[in-house]
Amino acid sequence: MKITERILRSLEKNWQTVALTAVCICLILAMIAAGQAQTVEAFATSDWGLSFGIPNAAPQGNVSAERLKEYDAYYIGDPESKTVYLTFDAGYENGYTPQILDVLKKHQVPAAFFLVKHYLESAPELVKRMAEEGHIVANHTASHPDMSRISSTEALQAELTPVEELYREITGQEMKKIYRPPQGKFSEENLKNAKELGYTTVFWSLAYADWNNKKQPNPQASIQKLNTRIHNGAVILLHSTSATNAEILDTLITDWKAQGYQFGTLDDFVNQ
């Protein structure tokens, strides 16, 4: 009987040890998985991307808003607020910016223009007008490179500083330290370097295929698409080179105001 009790007690202790070991292994595996998940979010992509669900609901970015915020980077505003942010990207002037500026002035809507150095060199009068009419002129780099391949602070600074200097020369003002990676190509190191240089990185939560000048989207279809995807806190990316955008902007702003949206400024994202 005593032998049997000893065997049972020994087995009981062994099972407790096995169970404890199994629990520890599970915890370790869970921690590893969590770490890998975080790494995937930060490193699995070099292209900014969005996933849309139901109409007029905020999309999910392929890196979360919380993760981006660690690097003073954003793609969307307050999801509880009907404030949206209108932004334009441009590497060159295609003849439509005066019309776009006229519409913005008509509706008293602020916008941000992310400009490449070439734009400032070739259209300084329009850059002056943007600044004079209260719009933000932001940095879209000097040469429009793939920023995921730029991994040092010095290399990033070489892309941003020439644009800052030219803007100062044209307007007499300091350029706000707001930056958008060309084509949405980025890396965690790039975001870190931008933060070190005092820059806020701004992606977008709403865009569409408007950049191909040889294949411009249908105006009515574009209005419908953008109206079904507008959402609280939207950071809207349009290209000012687009004939369609110049044609539909007045209608879009009118529609969005009718839906209760108001237009904010990217200053809202700086120093959050």
Image (cartoon, rainbow, N blue to C red):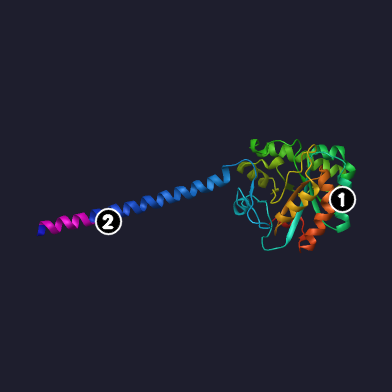
Spot occupied by residue 217 in the image (x, y as percentages of width and height)? 77, 44
- Residue density around tag 2, few if under 14, some if 14–19, many if 20 or more, within 10 Å: few
Task: Using residue 62 as the reference point, say whether residue 159 is left or right of it.
Answer: right
18 left or right, relative to 30: left
- Residue 149's quadrant in the figure? top right
* Camera sees residue 47: yes
Quadrant in which the N terminus is drawn: bottom left
Label for residue 253? none
The quarter of the displayed image where residue 78 is located: bottom right
Location of the C terminus by quadrant is bottom right
Q: How many marks?
A: 2
Q: Amino acid at mark 2?
A: Gln
Q: Which mark is residue 101?
A: 1
**Which amino acid, by three-letter code, is at mark 1?**
Leu
Judged by its main secondary structure, the magenta piece is helix
Magenta-colored span? 3-12
Disc number for residue 16: 2
